[in-house]
Amino acid sequence: MVLRRRKFYPFDVDRIFEIVEEQVRRSLEFTKRIFEKHGMPEEFFEGYRVPLVDILDEGDKYIIEVELPGLRKEDIEIYTYDNILEIIAKRKIERKEEEEGIIRLERAYSGFRRAFTLPTDADVDKIKAKYENGLLIIEIPKRGESSGRKKVDVE
């Protein structure tokens, strides 16, 4: 692998993030190739993936959709505290292969933790969640009046 030097501009923040992201991607691809060459299962790398999340505002409620294929409902935990919504998922992967005279059992643990700051009008006490076909849907109702920005008169 040959790294090319690029001219660095200290105030080009977007470019800095692009460079870091590219280096991390290359590093993970290289590591994955090494493990694949030596028989590490593909599932081992699933712990490094951050699930895709969509956040929708439907007027009277917020909807958070999280793609979590391959998980069971029991693998998912959702918590709220201090106007934060936290999603935690954990999964244990086991693969057992037997050949003549050789038994191989591999285990990998994967998971993620992701937290979102909820809007001030979110009704935390009425949050509902359901998990179906690899999609976690969290419904967060809004309180009647938004406690958003208000003008204060100066006396």
Image (tube, rainbow, N blue to C red):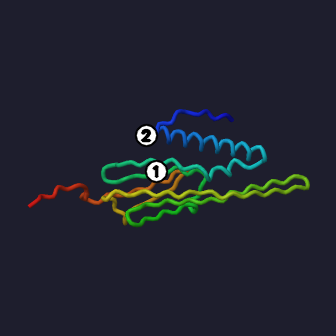
Q: Are marks 2 and 1 in contact (CB under 8 Å)?
A: no
Residue 60's x, y, as percent?
31, 53
Q: Circle 1 is placed at which residue position?
A: 65
Amino acid carrying label 2: it is Phe
Residue 137 visible, this orientation: yes
Q: CA distance from mark 2 to mark 1?
A: 35 Å
Judging depth in this view, the residue of 95 and 60 nearest the camera is 95
Going by the image, does 79 lie left or right of 155? right
* Residue in view at x 34 percent, y 58 percent: 141
Nearer the observer: mark 2 or 1; the answer is: 2
Q: Circle 2 is placed at which residue position?
A: 11
Q: Is disc 1 placed on a helix, strand or loop?
A: strand
Judging depth in this view, the residue of 5 and 115 nearest the camera is 5
Relative to 122, residue 56 above or below: above
Residue 69's x, y, as percent?
58, 50
Residue 46's x, y, as percent?
63, 50
* Residue in view at x 69 percent, y 47 percent: 42
Most extreme residue toward the left is 155
* Residue in view at x 31 percent, y 59 percent: 120
Q: Label 2: how many residues lie within 10 Å, few (<14), some (14-19) or many (20+)?
A: few
Q: Which quadrant is home to the C terminus? A: bottom left
